[in-house]
Amino acid sequence: MENIIASAVSQVGDTGHEAAPRRSPPGSFVIFGGGGDLTRRLLLPAIYNLACAGLLDDGFSVVAVDRAELTDEQLQRNVRAALEDFAARRGAEAVTLREDIWAWMQPRIRYVRGDFESMQTYQDIAAVVGDQNCIFYLAVAARFFGPIVDRLGEAGLVREGRHTFRRVIVEKPFGNDLPSAVALNERLLHTLTEQQIYRIDHYLGKETVQNILALRFSNGFFEPLWNRQNIDHVQITAAETVGVEQRAKFYEGTGALRDMVPNHVMQLLAMTAMEAPISFDADAVRNEKTKVLDAIHPLLPQDVVRGQYAPGVVGGKEVPGYRQEPGVDPHSLTETYMAMKFQIDNWRWAGVPFYVRTGKRLAARKTEIAIHFKSAPYALFRDTPVEKLAPNIMVIHIQPTEGVTMQFSAKIPGPSVRLGGVRMKFDYAEWFSEGPSTGYETLIYDCMIGDATLFQRADNIEAGWRAVQPVLDWGQDARSLDFYAAGSEGPEAADALLARDHRHWLKIG
């Protein structure tokens, strides 16, 4: 079955033509927090991959800004070590660092030492970047977002010229509730225009997430089925096997809801449920995503499950419960798992529930969107046990593997009519020879060329928070917390959430 799909894909692909992407404009990529973990593990390897792909202009440069005492030469040595580590940890596809690319990158890496709230730091940055194009990446704690943007404005560093741009990339979290998200947007927009702000969500850099739009709107046999007449319900899962690790201080004040749902999960929901935009222009796409989030029906307490992992076994090893983790309050009410039932009040999706779940210390690492189609009429198969009819499900796999699986019924070979479930699978790694990436390449490149399609707008951020704000308003309560063993599928209450609608979750592990 998969070979048939391979042949079909190959034949279709051979007729297509794709223009080579253009190089980025010249300019400086200024990273606040340039000495941090995000920069080392993800941003610099992403820039290296863009250089390998020939997408960076010769006038491109990196300026790392941080507090540590470093020279340009010391920073360059650190960057090389980070890139060598990235190349080596590609597993079976491990490679050595390309010396020609490194020779091109090394002289284009500069360092500015300074405090993020000191005007001297911004004067030093101005001396390095001059009047060229600039992207300022805020790879820093959220408390610095406002002050850095304020200082950039005061120093005149975000003033755009007729032929030059100045843009700011902001990492999540975008607030910790609706009021703080609104306040952050207002503060940023006091200095910047909306067109200068690129709110980044690394989930949207994954190929399969981007492919949701192509899958739906470029294939004539999907979109006619993508509605309440044909779809029974949708499941969105973002599961992790890791626990809180070294982030106890952060996680105690955040929890699974704030950490995952208003941003990552809501973006997956919006891209799955949005109407076709009039074009792939950034604002056209983001308008439709915001409409979906604005149409979400207010949550009710019975549609929400909060869980917390207890001791259990993950990967054959015993692991402690959340309350036994270093730095965690032994009586903590912070949730490490959320399951929620959303209803979208619009013409396309009325009556179709969207079940979402996210959690730590679950049975497997998996992020996916499962589209459950309505069953065919059973009359023709009255002699076949209904429970043996395979449900029609399309699963969009986002991580750890990227691809699409279709599940449907087919006749089992033989003289009698017997049905069995079969699957067709499309795997990105199998069909496209793209090398391993960090997930940031597309997003960084899009910001360079001014394409904001995969970035969130202020109203999109606020709509995501608005959808979950009722849960935050209810507050934490010991009675609302359900425990689950580490390494399991999650709390029993999450199963009951679907069971009362006569449905069940797909297995995680």
Image (cartoon, rainbow, N blue to C red):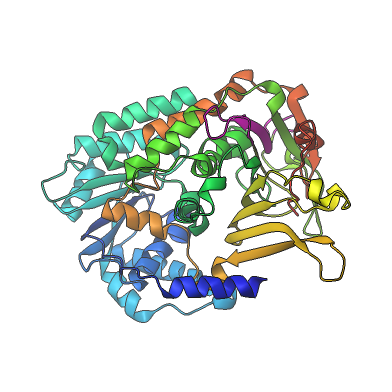
Q: How many marks?
A: 0
Question: In the visual, does 187 lie left or right of 464?
Answer: left
Camera-nearest residue between 449 and 158: 449
Which quadrant: the N terminus? bottom right
Residue drawn at point x = 70 percent, y = 62 percent: 423
Coordinates of residue 390 in the picture (x, y in percent): 77, 54
Residue drawn at point x = 61 percent, y = 31 percent: 342
Camera-nearest residue between 474 and 40: 474
Question: In the visual, does 33 lie left or right of 318?
Answer: left
Residue drawn at point x = 30 percent, y = 65 percent: 21
Residue drawn at point x = 62 percent, y = 47 percent: 246
Tell me which secondary structure the magenta stretch mostly adopts: loop
Which quadrant: the C terminus? bottom right
Coordinates of residue 412 in the picture (x, y in percent): 81, 66
Q: Is residue 490 above or below residue 89?
A: above
Q: Is residue 414 above or below residue 125?
A: below
In this view, the residue farthest toward the left is 162
Q: Is residue 182 above or below residue 445?
A: above
Can residue 112 be seen in this snapshot? no
Camera-nearest residue between 64 and 287: 287
Residue 350 belongs to magenta span:
yes
User: Would you identify the image quadrant in which residue 74 lies?
Assistant: bottom left
Residue 397 belongs to magenta span:
no
* Span shown in magenta: 329-353
Coordinates of residue 183 in the picture (x, y in percent): 39, 25
Coordinates of residue 438 in the picture (x, y in percent): 48, 61
Camera-nearest residue between 37 and 20: 20
Can residue 156 be seen in this snapshot? yes
In this view, the residue farthest toward the top is 474
